[in-house]
Image (spheres, rainbow, N blue to C red):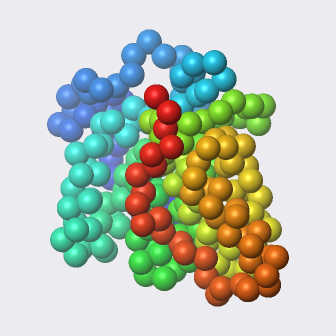
Amino acid sequence: MPPPGKKPQRPNRPEGAGKGGRPSVNRPRGKAPVAPGLLRVRRVDGNRYALLPPACAFEREEDLDEVRKMIAGGEPEIARDELLYLVADCRGFLEAHNLLGQLALEDEDIALARGHFGFAYEIALQSLGSAFQGILPAGREYNREFFLAGRGVARCLISRGKREEGREILKKMAKFDPREPDVKALLDELDEQDRTGNLPPVVPLVDEDDDDDSDDE
């Protein structure tokens, strides 16, 4: 399934090549192959794991930096086009999917934002597999982007009145990291709204601070 709003992609760089066709020095080596578009999973210690960015995300770090400059410079449409090319060329690029979701929210297009966040969320779930029972510390590596995507799609669902669907996603995220404070706060807010019947029209959709400090080194 192509990402929401996908545009025709530019020609792909050679596998394992960075800008200008040079071999990427950041590409992980000696790892078992995974299905195209999925992420690798690394054991941190015990029952704790971390999702790893795909090699193509390392190779496109400079492109993502340029996108952030476009957004900061007031060029969201150009940034959006570049992000669409990036995710077409690098399906597991969760950071790019999440940025597309945030840009859609700024346009108040909640349906499109849900699509972008949901795409990133589903990629991470598929990468973990249905039998995964471990803990994903929210501040570790690509776990950050997974939790941002999960919170994003849940909030979009809640804001469209699909509260139970949003709650189920948040409950699943809480199992992956019971210490993640933003997920817990959203679940507590939903419980309080249900208890009092005081339902605001929209649950806040974007974290004020996307940096997650719940990591425990």
Q: Is residue 110 above or below residue 71?
A: below
Q: Position of residue 179 (x, y in %)?
A: 61, 44
Q: Single out the residue that lies furthest toward the top.
A: 30
Residue for point 36% across, 30% down: 15
Residue 127 vs residue 33, the one in the foreground: 127
Residue for point 67% across, 43% down: 178
Q: Position of residue 188 (x, y in %)?
A: 70, 64
- Using residue 214 as the reference point, say whether residue 127 is left or right of it: right
Q: Position of residue 27 (x, y in %)?
A: 34, 25
Q: Quadrant of residue 79?
A: bottom left
Residue for point 68% across, 73% down: 158
Q: How many discs appear?
A: 0
The quadrant the N terminus occupies is bottom right
Q: Quadrant of residue 138?
A: top right
Residue 67 vs residue 42, the one in the foreground: 42
Q: Position of residue 133 (x, y in %)?
A: 74, 31
Residue 124 vs residue 14, the one in the foreground: 124
Q: Quadrant of residue 182?
A: bottom right
Residue 132 vs residue 140, the one in the foreground: 140
Residue 8 in view (yes/no): no
- Using residue 27 as the reference point, say whether residue 33 is left or right of it: right
Q: Is residue 79 above or below residue 144?
A: below
Residue 186 in view (yes/no): yes
Q: Is residue 29 above or below residue 22?
A: above
